[in-house]
Image: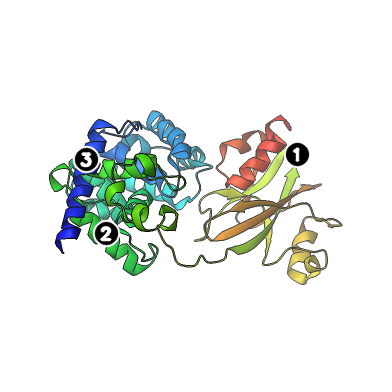
Amino acid sequence: MDVKEKTARLFFVSTLMDWNQNQNDRSMPWKGIKDPYKIWLSEIILQQTRVEQGLAYYNNFVKKYPTISDLANANENEVFKNWEGLGYYSRCKNLIVTAQFISNEKSGVFPNTYEEIISLKGVGPYTAAAISSFAFNLPHAVVDGNVMRVLTRFFGIDTPIDSTEGRYLLNELAQNLLDKKKANKYNQAIMDFGAMVCKPKQPNCKTCLLSPKCHSFNYSSPDEFPKKSKAKSKTNRWLMYFLPIYKNQILVGKRQQKDIWENLYEFPKLELNEQPTLELLKNAEHDNFLKKMGLTISEIPLFQVQLLTHQKIHACFIDVGLNKKIQIDQFEYVNLKGIKKLPFPKIIAAFIQSKNFQKTG
C-alpha cells in the first residue's frame, strides 16, 4: 500500500467516525441495543428488504415474541401469517428453525462467537458479522448494499459487486478499514452513512465530508458506482388458481416443494410456461384437471403480476362453485371465515382481501 492509499484510508475512517459522533441522527429501534435476539431478528427481516418496509414487521415480531423462546414456541402458521407480505419466505422458516434450536439446544442463550453465529440456519457472513459486532463488539466488518456503495464510490472500485472477485475485494477492504476496538460503532457508521449521505440516487456529495478524497466525486460520477454484472432476465411463470367452494368451505393446500413460497398456502392451480390460451388448456393434463372440477373455461381472466428477484409471477383467479366435494391430493377444505388466518403469498393474499371472504358465508 503506497502513502497516498494509506492516507486516503486513514482519512476515510477518521472522517466517518467523526460524522457518526457529531452528525449521525438516524434512528431505528434496533440501533444501539445489545440484545442479540433482537439484532438477529432485525437482520433477518431486513435481508432483501428496505428498512421502511421491515420496520413495522420488526415492531410486530418484538411485541408478539419478546424473547427467542416465545418465537420458538409459537404456532408456525401464526408466525408465517405475521411474516406475510415480506417475501423470501425461507427466511421465516429459518427464523423458526433457529429459534427452536437456540431455545432447545442452547437453553435460550444466543451464541456469542462469530463461528457459532454463522453456523445458525439462515445466517451468512454479513448477518453473522452484524450480530457479532453490534451485540458483542467483535471485530467483524459488515458489508451490505450501503457499505458496498460507499466503498466503491470513495475508492473508485469498478469490479462488479455481484462477482466473486468483487465480493472478495470489498470484504477484504472492509475488514482492513474496520476500527477493531469500536467495531459496533464503525459498522453502524458506514451503514448509516450509505443510507443518509451516500444514497443510491442523488447522494449529498456537495456537503459530504468524504468528498475531498472521494474518487467518484473528483474523477467520475457517483452514478457510475457500484458496478454490477449484466442483469439476468426474469423467468415468467403463469399460474391459474381455482377456488373450489362447497357450502362455505374452500380447498387450500400448503406448499411443500423446494420452490418459492414454501410453507405458505395456495389454491389448486395450473402452472404454464407461457401465457395461457383456450387452445393451450385443451391438452389432456389441463383438460382432465378442469373436468375434475366440472369446469369449462370460455374466457381467461386478467392476470395480476408479482415481481420476485429472478421470476415474474402472473396469476389469475377463477371461482368454482361445487355441487359436491372433490378431492385433490395435499389439499383440504377450510371454512371461508377462517381463511384469513392462514399465510398466503402476497399476490394471493391481496386477492383474498379484495374478495373479502369473511363476509361470505
**Res 191 quadrant in image:** top left
In front of the other: label 2 or label 3?
Answer: 3
Question: Residue 45 placed where, x, y %?
Answer: 41, 43
Q: Is residue 352 left or right of residue 87?
A: right
Residue 17: which numbered mark, if any? Answer: 3
The tag earlier along the polypeptide, 2 or 3, is 3
**Res 277 quadrant in image:** bottom right
Separation (CA) of disc 2 from disc 3? 19 Å
Q: Relative to 299, is 183 above or below?
A: above
List the residue tagged with mark 2.
Answer: 171
Separation (CA) of disc 1 from disc 2? 59 Å
Q: Amino acid at mark 1?
A: Lys
Separation (CA) of disc 3 from disc 1? 65 Å
Residue 247: which numbered mark, if any? Answer: 1
Q: Foreground: 22 or 49?
A: 22
Q: Foreground: 231 or 55?
A: 231
Q: Residues at badges 3 and 1 in contact (C-beta under 8 Å)?
A: no
- Few, some or many residues within 10 Å of mark 1 (<14, 14–19, 20+): few
Residue 35 appears in view: no
Mark 1, secondary structure of its residue:
loop
Mark 2, secondary structure of its residue:
helix
